[in-house]
Image (cartoon, rainbow, N blue to C red):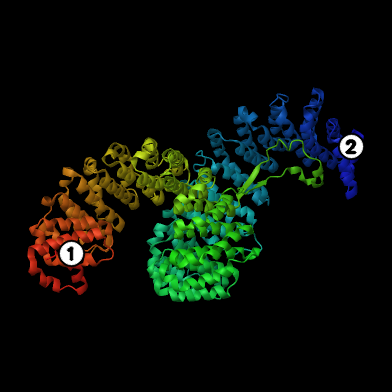
Amino acid sequence: MAQSLELLLIQFLMPDNDARRQAEEQIKRLAKDPQVVPALVQHLRTAKTPNVRQLAAVLLRKKITGHWAKLSPQLKQLVKQSLIESITMEHSPPVRRASANVVSVIAKHAIPAGEWPDLLPFLFQCSQSAQEDHREVALILFSSLTETIGSSFRPHFTDLQALLLKCLQDETSNRVRVAALKAVGSFLEFTNDGDEVVKFREFIPSILHVSRQCLASGEEDVAVIAFEIFDELIESPAPLLGESVKSIVQFSLEVCSSQNLESNTRHQAIQIISWLAKYKSNSLKKYKLVIPILQVMCPLLAESTDGDEDDDLAPDRAAAEVIDTMALNLPKHVFPPVFEFASLSSQNANPKYREASVTALGVISEGCLELMKNKLEPVLHIVLGALRDPEQMVRGAASFALGQFAEHLQPEIVSHYESVLPSILNALDDASDEVKEKSYYALAAFCEDMGEEILPFLDPLMGRLLAALHSSPRNLQETCMSAIGSVAAAAEQAFLPYAERVLELMKNFMVLANDEDLRSRARATELVGIVAMSVGRMRMESILPPFIEAAITGFGLEFSELREYTHGFFSNIAEILGEGFAQYLPHVVPLAFASCNLDDGSAVDIVESDDEIFNGFGGVSSDDEARDEPRVRNISIRTGVLDEKAAATQALGLFAQHTKSSYAPYLEESLKILVRHSGYFHEDVRLQATIALKHILLAALTIFQSQNEGTAKTKVILDTVMNIYIKTLAEDDDKEVVAQACLSVADIIKEYGYMAIEPYMPRLVDATLLLLREESACQQTEPDSDIDDDDTQHDEELMDAISDLLPAFAKSMGSHFAPIFAKLYDPLMKFARASRPSQDRTMVVACLAEVAQDMGSPIAGYVDRVMPLVLKELTSSEATNRRNAAFCVGELCKNGGESALKYYGDTLRGLYPLFGESEPDNAVRDNAAGAVARMIMVHPESVPLNQVLPVFLKVLPLKEDHEESITVYSCVSTLVLSSNPQILSLVPELVNLFAQVVVSPEETSEAKAEVGRAFSHLISLYGQQMQPLLSNLSPAHANALAAFAPRS
């Protein structure tokens, strides 16, 4: 065989394709015989040309696994010996490397079986050889063996690390240093043990040194291995980097600033900064690296890129991602330098810098939202100025930034509508389609949180948008439809005059079937749902069928985004039709099920083996392929499928919520899907499942309530849902999902009452404690971080949701909540420290107020500890804090018993400024009135009514917080009905107040009845003396009051 095989190997390397094909067929046939192994080994050692020797090694690697077990011990020894000789004596580097690959494959089977005990000693010996070639190939083998038999290296780990460090510092050979760098990369991928990984920290200076040399000699592909190593170190949970962060950042900044390097190399450097910002943000803060990074990243935003360059690798785009990540993780440290850069660059003569100035502001708006809200005037000055810039690129960036502001700086930005909306309207007429498209996006985002403020602009806006729908290219029409949706949602019933025309236009879009038009069809489907929500059931129900038919037909067009928006459309229609949507369930629920059951669509890139240089040799398959686990380099997810699944999951919950008992046929399958999706890998789907589970549970309650075994069936579903929620609170790593689980649990407690959730209380309390202590999975921070208390950010969504749980417990348990509250009190009060953000403190105060309200008298035990905090909060510069403090102080006085009495004087002094002209916020004033009313009702003798009542009555009627109505007007009514002399001295003020209350559309009939009783009492006391006061009222007020007068 040996002789014929040699000829075939030579023939395979010929340029003649036919000859190659014939040789390949013959080799495939021969390769099935185990005797091919000694024949290939012979050619590996004796063939005259390196190409033939290399090809023999490649073939041997492919076929050795299948034949190894069948070889005699003598033959196995021959193979091993020949490979060692090839590695040590072969002159050709490609042949040496190919032989090393064969060793790696054999070792995978031979070393665990104890068949090659002398391989590792040989490699250690080789790595210390005087010959550069030996040292290099030993390191190459260490790299490849790590992937196959890494566990066999464990006993030698310390020696290996010392060896790798020595080779990294090899003074005589760059090739050895490079091979050592690659070996370090391989070892790090394999090493999971934190203590072992920490030892690599001392490698960092040598890694940086080798990488700098590689960059200097043009070996960028090798230098980037350093970034792969740093990537592994950064993502490791062990505290690895220490002070090395400084040198890694310095090197990365050098690389990403070098315009002469390949874009991929620079991108890898920027990516390392991004990972550090994401995973080690506190280290960047600790070593004062934030400003040096931003001093490089911000100017990179202004770097011109070649039009042919891959967008994802463009330095300006990658720099924007880094700045965004830093803003999300270190907002306090990022905003000042970025704002300074933006202020200076906005005046730069170079338009790229003016563009960078507004891009930077847009990019940080999500992370730095609280800081930007406080600086909105100067920030908007820069961006609205850039919207008028002569250069299109600057105007485009400005409209992008404005869209980001509109999305993230709500609701504060809406108060600037008088300057922002005209600027956006102006930009809609821009000569550039790019500026127009971004301006439609900005308009859509801006209007989303507007209400009646939009009405003066409604006509010019809709005129512009409807004209654009007729005459613009498809991409502009799509953004335009989003903008119309936001306008419709803001205008509500005022949108009615435009609804018919918009819906007629949408009919044309909802029948488009060409691939390039399906995105427009998706947007149109979404818009019809939004318009329907704005104008309501009465106007829509009769004209809906053709739109629903078109939406169902669209499902057959195999376009994920269209299906996603269609689920949203059906969800909106279910909301406006309520149980009237039941007729459509048989058509739409199966579509939602289909989307929920879609394949995840993961796309995986596999690293190819190095022998693909013989690419014609695909016909000879590797025996090892079935057992080899190829290294996964990258996992990417088709987000379209994710978004579709999330929308379908949401739809199931909303269908159940709105159609109630009609949803019975779909309940079981929906629950199965939602249980599965509650553990889904992506948080968007888990979030929607968390919301939908509550709706399914409440629908089940309606469905089963009239059935014989209904209670047992509901209990099974309640068990399933509560177990998922409790697990989510402790174990889910996404804050939004956990926040939603908190809110859902609170809603279920309110809906079902304490008896239903009593079995889950111990675990619920444990989970709540975990969250208050910030020890749940979603609250974990990097292990080597030093978080200063004064640098803590308020975790608004999560902490506010957690603080909703305590009042829900209190409401369902009343005074029985006291022993549980005793456990939760200290962890809760940690958020009230002076060093915490003001939002944390007011969250605690609001939570205490609601607990005091519902737990009742046991709150007395906490008054002395809580009252100083609450009184201090009355003087806060934030209206929300003052409002919550006023509510809380009232509830503490109402339920705090004797403990609260001693604070009455301090409380009245603290509340007094909130009644004056200096208090700009009506809701604060209303809550202050509510607090005083509670104090009077509980201990009227402890309140100096002659001083308090004139001030109290002067701020009435309530202007904004009508939840205080019953408390406030019951207090006034009680005083009048008891003929309290202090209040009877204020009859003119009372008559005027009562008249305003009884005509107010905001007030409830209960509040009006209270003042009516008081007014009747005044009439019975004073009779005709009241006439002059009544004649001073307007006829409408007088008539409304007269209805409450006693019949004569």
- Relative horizontal placement of residue 881, taking residue 169 as reference (left or right): left
**Dot 2 amino acid type:** Leu
Q: Residue at x 37, y 39 (%)?
A: 757
Residue tagged 1:
1044
Residue tagged 2:
5
Q: Quadrant of residue 898?
A: top left
On screen, residue 976 above or below 491: above
**Dot 1 amino acid type:** Phe
Where is residue 1? Give x, y as percent: 90, 33
Q: Residue at x 81, y 43 (%)?
A: 619
Are discs 2 and 1 less than 8 Å apart at CB? no
Where is residue 995? Give x, y as percent: 19, 67
Q: Nearer the viewer, residue 654 or 795?
A: 654
Where is residue 616? Give x, y as percent: 82, 47
| Classed neighbour count for the residue bearing mark 2: other residues with Cα under 10 Å, few (<14), some (14–19), many (≥20) | many
Q: Residue at x 48, y 50 (%)?
A: 663
Which of the marked residues, 2 or 1, is nearer the chain's N terminus?
2
Per the image, label 2 sits on a secondary structure element best described as helix
Per the image, label 1 sits on a secondary structure element best described as loop
On screen, residue 96 above or below 425: above
